[in-house]
Image: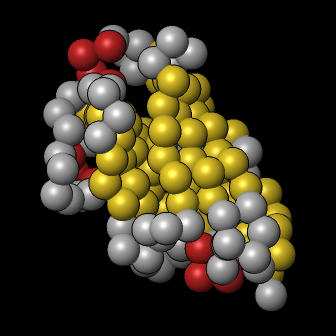
Amino acid sequence: QVQLVESGGGSVQAGGSLRLSCAVSGATASTSCLAWFRQTPGKEREGVANVDRYGATLYAESVRGRFTVSRDNVKNTLYLQMNNLKPDDTARYYCAAGRRYYSNDLAPNRYSYWGQGTQVTVST
């Protein structure tokens, strides 16, 4: 069974930075691809970025150049460094795991395991 636990959320002013972490435990084969998603009330869950175990990454256009996704396969941890944050980045951020890496889409249905999320709030 795969378990994902996010941390690092909080409140920050626009232009600031936060680093999210996601501790990953469970079957290695089920965590070949790790990803970050975010969701605000009343909206669909949005893909932010993914990374495979070899470091290949994919970013949503809205965060490219500001966010960096990475993973430490020894520590079994996923990270999301978020710089130059904007109020539109306010959301609950979730990490997700799946068996297969997808290089061209960030669809939520590609992922089988999800964490409980961590809230990020960006104020003006």
Q: Give the total number of marks visible in the rendering.
A: 0
What residue sits 54% from the left and 75% below the top?
Answer: 41
Q: Is residue 73 visible?
A: yes
What residue sits 27% from the left and 57% below the top?
Answer: 106
What residue sits 74% from the left and 61% below the top?
Answer: 17
Q: Which of 50 and 109 is in front in this view?
A: 50
Specify whether 3 is left or right of 28.
Answer: right
What residue sits 54% from the left and 72% below the top?
Answer: 40
x then y, percent, for residue 118: 65, 50
Specify whether 123 is left or right of 104.
Answer: right
Specify whether 9 is left or right of 40.
Answer: right
Quarter of the image for residue 2 reads top left
x then y, percent, for residue 13: 83, 75
Q: Nearer the viewer, residue 109 or 77?
A: 77
Quarter of the image for residue 123 reads bottom right
Specify whether 36 is left or right of 14.
Answer: left
Q: Quadrant of the C terminus?
A: bottom right
Q: Residue furthest bottom?
A: 124
Location of residue 6 with respect to 4 vertically, above or below: below
Q: In which quarter of the image is the N terminus?
A: top left
Location of residue 96 with respect to 82 vertically, above or below: above
